[in-house]
Amino acid sequence: MLVYDPLTNPLNQIEWAFGALECIHIASFAVAIGSIAMVDFRLMGLGLKNLRSSDLLRTTTFWTLGGLTTAITSGLLLFSTDPERYSRNEVFRLKLICLVIAIIYNYTVHRMVARRGSAGAGVIAGAMSLLLWVPVIFGGLFYAFT
Ligand code: HEM
């Protein structure tokens, strides 16, 4: 039977590899959540008021998708360095559950409201989106303390 030994993972063998990948992880989720937050603030009427939310959504779509794809790929690679420890950690598991909920919300309700650009629903949809991403970031930050 083939058993995966994390010690054979290059990310555990090359001294700087884990740190470098973590930098990519951080930069990519900053791009993803940053581009989503731009739409959120527009929806809430707190900035970029000279742009329509539908136009902003179109402009940021590439950055959101690219950022999310890179964050998820780099996250999975980081996870591969010690799958047992990460999967046992409740905060880490909670982060992933929140991530799935935030992504589903982003590509359904959030997108629909941003396309229509309705003011009332926009405030709720934008605030809700920000609220859903916060636990993903804090889950990533605080998992190490649990
Ligand atoms: C947009 C989505 C994501 C966000 C916002 C996010 C957020 C974070 C944050 C804030 C950190 C801590 C960085 C640090 O303190 O240096 C982190 C580390 C990490 N993330 Fe993510 N993450 C995301 C997606 C994922 C995914 C999909 C996975 C894997 C399935 C994952 C696995 C990891 C791992 C393994 C670490 C390293 C933890 C450690 O330092 O040991 N992340 N993430």
Image: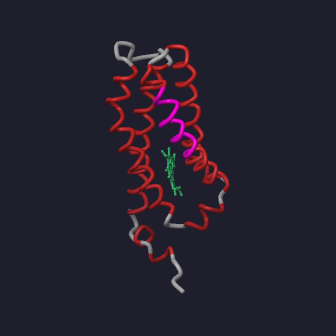
Q: Residue at x 36, y 35 (%)?
A: 61
Q: Is residue 108 magenta?
A: yes
Find the magenta span and give its range: 99-112
What is the total number of numbered labels drawn onto the structure image?
Answer: 0
Among the 4 quarters of the image, the one containing residue 124: top right
- Quadrant the C terminus occupies: bottom right
Q: Is 94 within the magenta? A: no
Residue 61 lies, with reference to residue 88, above or below; the image says: above
Instruction: Return the residue nearer the eye: 39 or 92.
Output: 39
The residue at 51%/78% (across/down) is: 5
Image spot of residue 24 (x, y percent): 38, 51
Q: Is residue 52 left or right of residue 112?
A: left
| Residue at x 50% of width, y 18% of height | 44
Q: Residue at x 49, y 66 (%)?
A: 80
The residue positioned farthest toward the bottom in the image shown? 1
**Toward which corner of the image does residue 51 lie, by quadrant?**
top left
Q: Position of residue 111 (x, y in %)?
A: 46, 30
Q: In this picture, is 91 found above or below 112?
A: below
Pick whichever, 76 or 19, lies toward us: 76
| Image x and y of residue 86, in percent | 59, 61
The colour scheme is secondary structure
> In the rendering, at what x and y percent does residue 98 appear?
60, 44
Instruction: Quadrant for residue 15, please give it.
Output: bottom left
Whether residue 60 is situated above or below residue 48 in the rendered picture: below
Query: Seen in the image, is 17 located left or right of residue 113?
Result: left
- Image quadrant occupied by the N terminus: bottom right
Magenta stretch, overall SS: helix
